[in-house]
């Protein structure tokens, strides 16, 4: 056989993934450049002060918030894959809290407004949400009901042409900054799933003041995601117009179940992207850190740890991409979405732990930022559905 006919292996060629076109890659390059220049330099500052509203406003100006929404509402008209590109690009910010805050806006709040909203609701909330001039929050979790959405107790009782809301929500991202919210409530407390409705409501006025009957009762301090604000909310005889219903009355459980699928798949992308950034940092450290007269990366133990992590990241990434392909082609693969979320979240936490181990004592120090990634990534196994809930969804899908 002539040498010219032999296929030679190419390592690290940066070949494009099968789901992404050149347009996706161009957007990725543009967004990564913006993130590295305008967001990444502030990552340490925002751990203490929280990321500013101006960051999401700037993203809106650049068109990054409306990648998958129709042009008629100010979006870019792109396919679902652009959501993954955005999640992966934001990983370069070095701040899980910022990525989470952005994802609430782009992948949790605005999609149901687009899918279920009336034209009036879309003009009032979707358009400025895409522009970044209005920030939203999603109100599901309560002190006594998290993954068990049917167990929520916040009520919205119809009184003439208004709903009167009473109850509380907790672990709400963007609680201190949002001026509107997609709120999950019980409009018929006598029912479980069929008593749930979504409301699309204003919670603050144009000056940022809480509307009467709404308040943030506590700004919660977290283990990680420090750049993102998280709060506990209270509604006391909070009145909203009856036309605040998003979708259909009594169909809120099914509406929010649909929303959660997109949220979970984007979370999977964020997990593998965050793990990839952390591995890159660790590889550089392994090349520079000397022990016993040579870089620690030259020791087989370290080299094999890195090889194993790279394999897990790539496997998780490719599985997420395959599920995204199905979603983009009109399928609704709940089982596989749950698998992707579960796999990527667990993998990211394993990678973060191993990267700290490779850094040794420095990995435990804030100076190297590895410990921040460890703390941030731990939420991935809880938010958007815990590992246990994902396992239950997967198990039940087999008729068990």
Image (spheres, grey):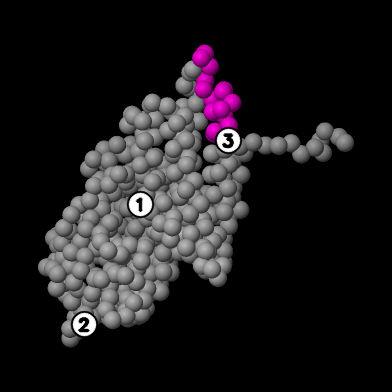
Cα distance, mark 2 to mark 1? 34 Å
Query: Closer to the N terminus: mark 2 or mark 1?
Result: 1
Quadrant showing the N terminus: top right
**Residue tagged 3:** 307
Q: Nearer the viewer, residue 308 or 198?
A: 308
Q: Main secondary structure of the magenta part?
A: helix
In the picture provided, is 241 more to the left or to the right than 289? left
Count residues near mark 3 (Cα–Cα under 10 Å), then give few for <14, some for 14-19, many for 20+: few
The answer to whether the residues at label 2 and label 1 have Cβ atoms under 8 Å apart is: no
Q: Pick the residue in front: 84 or 331.
A: 331
**Which of pointers 2 and 1 indicates the residue nearer the eye?**
2
Q: Secondary structure at mark 3?
A: helix
Q: Residue furthest front?
A: 400
Look at the numbered disc 2 and give the secondary structure of its residue: strand
- Residue that mark 1 sits on: 100
Q: Earlier in the sequence, mark 3 or mark 1?
A: 1
Tell me where residue 10 appears, x and y as whole percent: 67, 37
Q: Is residue 298 magenta?
A: yes
Q: Which residues make up the magenta segment?
A: 292-307
In the image, is residue 65 part of the stretch drawn in magenta? no
At horizontal 25% and vertical 51% (from top left) the residue drawn is 229
Is any part of residue 84 visible from this angle? no
**207 on left or right of 100:** left
Position in image of residue 304 (x %, y %):
58, 32
Secondary structure under badge 1? helix
Residue under circle 2? 158
Farthest bottom residue in view: 160
Q: Does label 3 or label 2 sit earlier along the sequence?
A: 2
* Residue at 52% from the left image edge and 20% from the top image edge: 295
- Label 2 crowd (10 A; few <14 / some 14-19 / many >=20): some
**Which image quadrant for residue 212?**
bottom left
């Amino acid at each position: 056989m002539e040498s010219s006919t032999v296929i030679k292996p190419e390592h690290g060629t940066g070949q494009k993934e099968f789901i992404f076109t050149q347009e996706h890659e161009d957007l990725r390059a543009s967004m990564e450049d913006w993130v590295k220049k305008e967001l990444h330099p502030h990552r340490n500052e925002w751990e203490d002060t929280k990321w500013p509203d101006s960051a999401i406003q700037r993203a809106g100006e650049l068109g990054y918030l409306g990648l998958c929404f129709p042009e008629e509402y100010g979006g870019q008209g792109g396919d679902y894959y652009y959501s993954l590109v955005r999640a992966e690009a934001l990983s370069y910010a070095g701040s899980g809290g910022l990525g989470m805050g952005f994802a609430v806006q782009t992948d949790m709040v605005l999609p149901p407004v687009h899918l279920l909203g009336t034209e009036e609701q879309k003009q009032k909330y979707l358009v400025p949400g895409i522009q970044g001039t209005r920030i939203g929050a999603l109100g599901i979790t309560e002190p006594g009901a998290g993954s068990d959405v049917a167990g929520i107790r916040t009520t919205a009782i119809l009184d003439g042409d208004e709903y009167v809301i009473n109850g509380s929500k907790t672990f709400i991202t963007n609680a201190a900054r949002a001026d509107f919210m997609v709120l999950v409530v019980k409009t018929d407390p006598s029912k479980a799933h069929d008593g749930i409705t979504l409301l699309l409501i204003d919670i603050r006025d144009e000056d940022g003041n809480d509307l009467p009957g709404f308040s943030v009762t506590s700004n919660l301090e977290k283990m990680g995601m420090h750049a993102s604000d998280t709060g506990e909310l209270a509604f006391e005889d909070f009145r909203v117009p009856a036309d605040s219903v998003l979708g259909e009355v009594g169909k809120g459980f099914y509406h929010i179940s649909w929303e959660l699928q997109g949220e979970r798949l984007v979370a999977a992308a964020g997990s593998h992207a965050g793990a990839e950034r952390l591995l890159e940092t660790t590889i550089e450290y392994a090349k520079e850190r000397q022990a016993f007269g040579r870089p620690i990366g030259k020791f087989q133990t370290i080299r094999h740890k890195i090889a194993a992590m790279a394999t897990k990241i790539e496997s998780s990434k490719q599985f997420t991409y395959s599920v995204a392909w199905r979603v983009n082609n009109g399928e609704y693969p709940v089982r596989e979405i749950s698998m992707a979320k579960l796999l990527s979240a667990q993998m990211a936490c394993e990678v973060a732990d191993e990267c700290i181990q490779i850094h040794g004592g420095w990995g435990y120090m804030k100076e190297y930022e590895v410990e921040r990634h460890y703390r941030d990534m731990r939420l991935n196994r809880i938010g958007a559905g815990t590992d246990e809930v994902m396992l239950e969804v997967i198990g039940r899908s087999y008729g068990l």
